Amino acid sequence: MISRRSLFASVLALPPALRAARELSCDVAVIGGGVGGCAAALGALRNGMRVAMTEETDWIGGQLTSQMVPPDENGSIETGGGTALYREYRKAVRDYYKRYYPLTADARGRERLNPGDGSVSRLTHEPRVSLAVLEGLLAPYASGGKFTLLLNAKPVRADVSGDQVRAVTLSGGKTISAKYFIDATEQGDLLPLTKTEYVTGFESRKQTGEPHAPEQAQPRNIQSFTYCFAMDYLEGADHTVDKPADYKFWRDYMPALKPAWSGKLLSWTVCHPITLAKREMSFDPTMKSKVPAGGANLWQYRRIASKANFTAGAYDGDISLVNWPQNDYWLGNLHEVSEAEKAKHLRGGKQLSLSFLYWMQTEAPRPDGGAGWRGLRLRPDLAGTEDGLAKYPYIRESRRIQSEFTVLEQHVGKDARKADTAEQFADTVGIGSYRIDLHPSTAGDNYIDVASLPFQIPMGALMPKRVNNLLAGAKNLGVTHITNGCYRLHPVEWNIGESAGALAAHAVAAKLAPRQIRNDKALLAEFQAKLTAQGVMLAWPK
């Protein structure tokens, strides 16, 4: 019997003739198949374009799948707060569970089913479900010959003529030529290859005027990344992993952050991200112990399967996703460094996550006074990897284009704005809402977590200042280190990608450059009307 996963993969797979060909031509090339990349491809496809999309791993979906992070969303996402297409994706996730999973009658009847009943999201779920849904959304276009997907393909070179990108060559040797390119890679990998001007890290207060910016620019000061993993718990069993090589280092590691962290990293005591005060968390996979005041049971925090939602015997226990303060890695960067240094930090991030798991299994204080939960079982089957860790690290901060317009803290930050609403952008192509949420960074900054106002996505932030046929389709748009903190979340990245795909398609069809569309009121209004007709909200209701 052919599995649903195999069926989708076979539909999206390249025909033999295309696999053998060294060159591929299309209207819009989406480089990077994460959340923004999938949305960009769909945005261009539904507007009649021939699209090719690349993906560095063998799973499309980025944050949702290969990085194993259930969606972080705003409070209005069920009825608004994102594009209609994003809400269609969310509904499809729930429908997938209701069709294929052995849910209880109560869970099946719940319109707003949350499979994991996690406390951080209304849709905590297994990454393979998002993978199946995204593949399903793209499958009709692949069958119709409009969509080509290239997996395990990373951009390595670009052919550029003046201010125009002509082609991108991938690892393996295949070259894609296109009228428009959308960089939807996790770290803005296309920017240095195409010599598109970009920034990294923390801008200075002199550059941006942002209240939370430092006096001097810190281009290597980048948010931490995380290797996520899933685990369940089997009472009385012993699933202790081999002791990681770097366990002693991480067990004893004391974060040297400004302001100071509260004790050791591997501990149930963490920093409150907003106040930076000491915060006592609990961890109890049995869910029987009392949660400290102001804390949370981390087991439930990103739980992706709640046993109570499934019929008896379907699951051995709950499944929890570990993307917590204790496995954020900030000892080095993954871009703007040599391949050797990158490999060193990727290994370091993996060793941290495995050390955290081993610590939880062997030494972590238990509410009953004991130490360690040996029944914690790593779930490599859910990650699709041999080591049990996500296929790709969860990336919070990318290279960012030097754009026609850059969103600053003063535009969206509640205190910096000193107004009831965020800046209203005449060239809006979407909306988002989330706190400015910055995790500890590589120069030793602790959390920066401040309130923001529901905001818009300006078209100018998708467009480089110089290069004509390249658009930002993910976290690499024109934001700062600070405003990246609220523009990096799942529904916002989706909206960025979807609007970038629609803009590229509109530019091809109208034979106009995106800059022309943005700078002409009538042309801009025509494009914005098209976005609205396709379910992209341009402004928040008053």
Image (cartoon, helix red, strand yellow):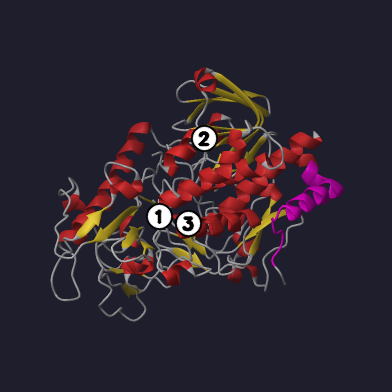
| Span highlighted in magenta in the image | 517-540
| Residue 517: image location, x then y, percent | 79, 43
**Residue 180: quarter of image:** top right
**Which of the image's four quarters has the C terminus?**
bottom right
Camera-nearest label, 3 or 1: 3
Would you name the residue on which mark 3 appears?
Answer: 99
| Residue 209: image location, x then y, percent | 61, 59
429 vs 324, left or right, is right
Separation (CA) of disc 2 from disc 1: 22 Å
Q: Alpha-carbon neighbours of circle 2 within 10 Å: few (<14), some, or many (≥20)? A: some
Mark 2: amino acid: Val
Q: Are marks 3 and 2 in contact (CB under 8 Å)?
A: no
Viewer-proximal residue among 22 and 31: 22
Q: Are marks 2 and 1 in contact (CB under 8 Å)?
A: no
Would you name the residue on which mark 2 appears?
Answer: 11
Q: Are marks 3 and 1 in contact (CB under 8 Å)?
A: no
The residue shown at (77%, 50%) is 530
Camera-nearest label, 3 or 2: 3
**Residue 237: quarter of image:** bottom left
Q: Residue furthest right?
A: 522
Mark 1: amino acid: Glu
Would you name the residue on which mark 1 appears?
Answer: 126
The residue shown at (26%, 43%) is 387
Q: Secondary structure at mark 3?
A: helix
Q: Alpha-carbon neighbours of circle 1 within 10 Å: few (<14), some, or many (≥20)? A: many
| For marks 3 and 1 on the same chain, the one whose residue lies earlier in the sequence | 3
